[in-house]
Image: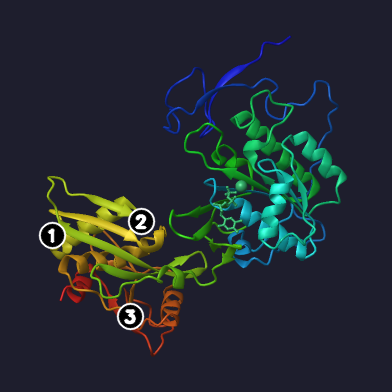
Amino acid sequence: MAKPKLSFICQNCGSVTARWQGKCESCGEWNTIVEENSAGGIGGGPQGASRRRGRPSALLPLSGEMEEAPRIISKIDELDRALGGGIVRGSAILIGGDPGIGKSTLLMQAAAALSRNGHSVVYVSGEEAVAQVRLRAQRLKAADTDVQLMAETNVEDILATLAEARRPDLVIIDSIQTLWSDMADSAPGTVTQVRAGVQAMVRFAKASGAAVILVGHVTKEGQIAGPRVVEHMVDAVLYFEGEGGHHYRILRTVKNRFGPTDEIGVFEMGDLGLREVQNPSELFLGERNEKAPGAAVFAGMEGTRPVLVEIQALVAPSALGTPRRAVLGWDQPRLAMVLAVLEAHCGVRLGQHDVYLNVAGGFRISEPAADLAVAAALVSSLSGAPLPSDCVYFGEISLSGSVRPVAHAAQRLKEAEKLGFRQAVLPSAPADMPRSRDMSGFEVEALPDLVARVAV
Ligand code: TYD
Ligand code: MG
């Protein structure tokens, strides 16, 4: 008998080491390395199984016409948009997120919606018993649909059952961490098992043409393998995020072989499950205190959609030798850069001040276009003068202090106008940009222009 092959695998990033270590060299996490028996390997089939030879096919079908990837539409717009316009048949999609964030809720609602549109959906739950899933479905008013439920964790059993079922359009696996395969020897939840299970499901998706959605819990402790170890195996990766204390949830696409990756879907969690938020700006601007200094509204873009959020800054004299810089929802090095440009080119001295920056509502911004709004909030907080409440800001600041144009200026202005804003501070815009009579634009070429306007 062959000696079982032991390896040490990081449960966070999946890297393999020769011996046990306290800290993973590859991802830097502590206590994530676990000894696993990888005999048989991933996808290792029985010895001597007959081999089928593949047949190459032409890149373009002879008929010439290129087809769009066929998609199934859930009619939950926020979900379809995040996926790039619906679920592509035959694709494998991973949805990751913290436990309790609402992944099962989202997918049960999606399953019900698809089933109502005439698609056959199988929901495989490895975490909850069928009765529990039914209870949730009742609460979500999804119980009257034809969604097929299955409480199963063994991949071979799942595949055998699926082969007998009416050909499904969509299979939901909740979650990958409960999957285990006969082919791998390790315990369920380890990297080897999670990979083997996901690989079998991806193969099923490609072979059967059914879409497969895989749920993965994000784990901080590294006791079970996280979604990161299988991200490269699937066609699309989405993360479901939310802030403690807030009811809204954001579905963010980080990888998509069939669509853009900067789209988000916004939902609100309520007693009856997740509700779509069609206009996120209203949500993020909901609790605005318009008279407070240090708050600036940023007209941002998330994918194809404009989103307005409030940026709050607090600047206070520091009692410490090294002043504090704390950022929530934005990039720390980016804040350091804006502070340096304010100091070097505008004479705004913040070296002896603590600086706190917060994006309201727990939203996260990754666009450099927020630079101008951040600068406005900082200067307003320092001077104690509130900014006009009907004004939005956007523009990228360069190290030389000039303000650079950003994409989608017209769309940002349109959204601001729709929400009742009447002024915008923005980079100099091309003359042919459509403008509205109700909205006055103040074009700034360099940061000192903004500072002169804000600091009254
Ligand atoms: P769940 O979908 O089970 O999370 P996950 O699958 O990501 O672990 O969601 C669990 C949380 O959502 C739980 O704290 C209760 C809450 N919830 C509601 O607020 N309303 C609802 O209608 C449902 C079904 C859940
Ligand atoms: Mg769940």
Comparing 45 with 227, the one in front is: 227
Instruction: Measuring from the top left, give residue 305's x and y in whole percent.
Output: 50, 69
Residue under circle 3?
390
| Residue at image location 13% in from the left, 59% down from the top | 349
Residue 266 visible to the viewer: no
- Numbered badge on residue 330: 2
Q: Quadrant of the N terminus?
A: top right
Point out the residue furthest to the top here: 1
Comparing 308 with 293, the one in front is: 293
Earlier-in-chain disc, 3 versus 1: 1
Q: Quadrant of residue 358?
A: bottom left
Q: Quadrant of residue 283?
A: bottom left
130 displayed left or right of 426: right
- Numbered badge on residue 349: 1
Q: Name the secondary structure under disc 3.
A: loop
Query: Could you give the CA–CA distance between mark 1 and mark 2, rounded to whole angstroms?
Result: 22 Å
Q: Is mark 3 within 8 Å of ligand 1?
A: no
